[in-house]
Amino acid sequence: MERNANGRELIVYDAIIIGGGPAGLQAALTLGRMHRRTLLLDSRDYRNGTVRHAHNLLTNDGRDPAELRRIGRDEVAAYPDVEIRDAAVTAVVREDAALTVRVGAERLRAHAVILATGVADRLPDIPGLAEQWGDRVANCPFCHGHEFAGRPVAIVNGSDHAAVLGRMLEPVASEVHLVDPATVTRIDGTDEGLALELTDGSAIEVAGAFVAPTWRSRADFLGELGVELQETGAVRTDPFGRTSIENVYAVGDLAQPDHLPGPMFSLAAAIAGGQLAAVAVVQSLVMR
């Protein structure tokens, strides 16, 4: 065991995973199966915390994301080399040959760190929208479009991407309304879906709406850590989640490999990324 300046033992993990969503849990599962001493730190703050049904995930289509996380935790907990703690990380720094993860005043040491914190959405400033977010208002047509099948939907987005999204939804919805966010004064829930009140005094009745929120990283320590970012703001990685800093990996919504135009906001992609990063960590451990 290494010791700090006060002579207290510093626990050294093979890997510390920051984030308890699908990417982090899959990374923990893979490392646990390879008998690598792993710590998963989960802030319990999730991007899909308001979502009640996750879709487009094979064998779990329509399951509550909270249930997915509970099942994942239970599966990971079966492996004695993995420890799970509910805690928020305040910093990650490289010190000597290892990485130090700070949780409050506590310092934890690891050979590798996997960033799986996810991101937080910034919604358009439309009254009533936040209350519907994750239910009748969504972002991804692959995850939530089918639930509005055969009924009208609105795309509240003034960008060029709105037209593309509209064409994607044409086979699904009975009607697609393209709406500039600047013309929407309020969004209210109705018995049949949503009512979008417009600046001209009219209203559009739809089953659901799609918006394009901006987002920010949940890892407030990224600037101090110094990992390279893409133009999108996501952490730049290779296909195995490796970042510009040795033995620091990024997976899930936070990460963007060079071959993709942006981060892949997908449960399946997050799970795949978590597994690949864990594989890379194991390989780095045997190669050092």
Image (cartoon, rainbow, N blue to C red):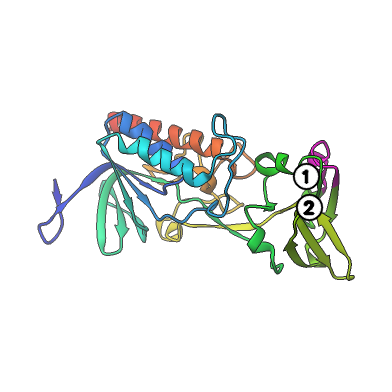
In this rendering, which labeled residue sits more in front, label 2 or label 1?
2
**Residue numbers of the magenta segment:** 163-175
Q: Position of residue 105 (x, y in %)?
A: 26, 64
Quadrant location of the C terminus in the rendered image? top left
Q: Assess disc 1: are there few (<14), some (14-19) or many (≥20) residues with their C-alpha within 10 Å of its C-alpha.
A: some
First of labels 2, 1 by sequence position: 2
Residue 236 appears in the picture as rendered = no
Q: Assess disc 2: are there few (<14), some (14-19) or many (≥20) residues with their C-alpha within 10 Å of its C-alpha.
A: many
Residue that appears at 61% across and 52% down:
232
Was residue 229 drawn as part of the magenta stretch in this picture? no
Quadrant location of the N terminus in the rendered image? top left
The answer to which of 56 and 265 lies nearer the viewer is 56
Query: Quick check: 15 left or right of 20?
Result: left
Provide the residue designation for mark 2: 155
Q: Position of residue 162 (x, y in %)?
A: 79, 50
The label number, if any, that marks residue 257 in the structure image: none
- Inspect the image, locate mark 1, and give the three-letter code of the amino acid beneath it: Leu
Was residue 174 drawn as part of the magenta stretch in this picture? yes
* Residue sitting at the far front: 191
**Separation of disc 2 and disc 1 at Cα?**
8 Å
Query: Quick check: 277 left or right of 122?
Result: left
Provide the residue designation for mark 1: 165
- Above or below, 249 relative to 78: below
- Residue 25: quadrant of the picture: top left
Residue that appears at 80% across and 44% down:
164
The answer to which of 287 and 85 lies nearer the viewer is 85
- Residue 137: quadrant of the picture: bottom right
Are dots 2 and 1 in contact, CB under 8 Å?
Answer: yes
Residue that appears at 40% across and 37% down:
27
